[in-house]
Image: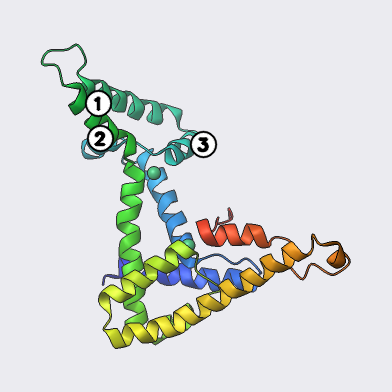
Amino acid sequence: MEQIYTIPVNMAFEESIEASKEGVHICPFCRMYDSLEKEETELILGASMMEPDTRIKTNESGFCPDHLMKLFTMGKRLPLALMLESHLDHIVNEMKCGIFPAKSGASAAKSLREISDGCYICDRIEHNFNLRVEAAALLWQNDPAFREKTAAQHHFCLDHFVRFLAAAQERMSKKEFAEFYKTVGAAEAEYIASLRDDVSWFCKKFDYRYTDEPWNGAKDAPERSAAFLKGDTVPEK
Ligand SMILES: [Zn+2]
Ligand SMILES: [Zn+2]
């Protein structure tokens, strides 16, 4: 595995450990996803914008609602408008409505569905993110220091934990995967159980018998549960 994949994985795992010491608990894979997303959105409105190959792909895939809105917040309206102009051209062309040779409605509907479901940025992130999850599984196999960094994580969000497990299962022998699941899984299960207890205490606090009891840190338990289930939001630096 090349260092271009292992370095960012190590960095994200180390950053999450450091942030945890300050009381900010973020899944290390969410950090990786966030930094890939930043790189891709900056690239698309910067260096990649005028590249013909990129333009062909953005024309074909377009952007999901989330990434389109992110591009709007970046203050680069002209590059964005140029890209949209060419994407809209592509859509008109795919419709071929009333133009000879006309496309059938069914065939146009299929093309439009593909454009509407696609996202150039999601595709790029997904490709690189996958390689990083695979790199994390490989590091866990080969690097004792990385095992320690994994054990020192506060938690993984559910989606990324599932992906980490799948990548580990894919490359490990049954015996090694059993060891991986025993250690990484046990820590994660412990975190989820503590989250559940906090949510439970949060609910109890609405009972008049418990109103005078302390919150015991459970005031934001629903928010922390939602973050665990949907992925952490990485705070701005
Ligand atoms: Zn995550
Ligand atoms: Zn997207």
Task: Please give the name of the residue rendered at 83% of the width and 69% of the height, measured from the top-left corner.
Answer: 214
What x and y, as percent, mark residue 220? 70, 60
Disc 1 from disc 2: Cα separation? 7 Å
Q: Amino acid at mark 1?
A: His
Mark 3 or mark 2: which is in front?
A: 2
Q: Nearer the viewer, residue 30 or 222?
A: 222
Considering only vertical position in the picture, is 68 above or below 93?
below
Contact, mark 1 vs mark 2 (Cβ under 8 Å) = yes
Q: Which residue is mark 2?
A: 60
Contact, mark 3 vs mark 1 (Cβ under 8 Å) = no
What x and y, as percent, mark residue 168? 33, 75
Q: Which mark is residue 73?
A: 3
How busy is the neighbourhood of tag 3: few (under 14 within 10 Å), some, or many (20 plus)?
Answer: few
Label 1: which secondary element: helix
Q: Which mark is residue 90?
A: 1
**Image quarter (top left, top right, bottom left or bottom right) of the C terminus:** bottom right
Disc 3 from disc 2: Cα separation? 23 Å
5 left or right of 78 in image: left
Q: Nearer the viewer, residue 138 or 168?
A: 168
Q: Which numbered disc, 3 or 2, marks the residue that appears first in the sequence? A: 2
76 left or right of 90 in image: right
Task: Please give the name of the residue rendered at 32% of the width and 66% of the height, measured from the top-left corner.
Answer: 5
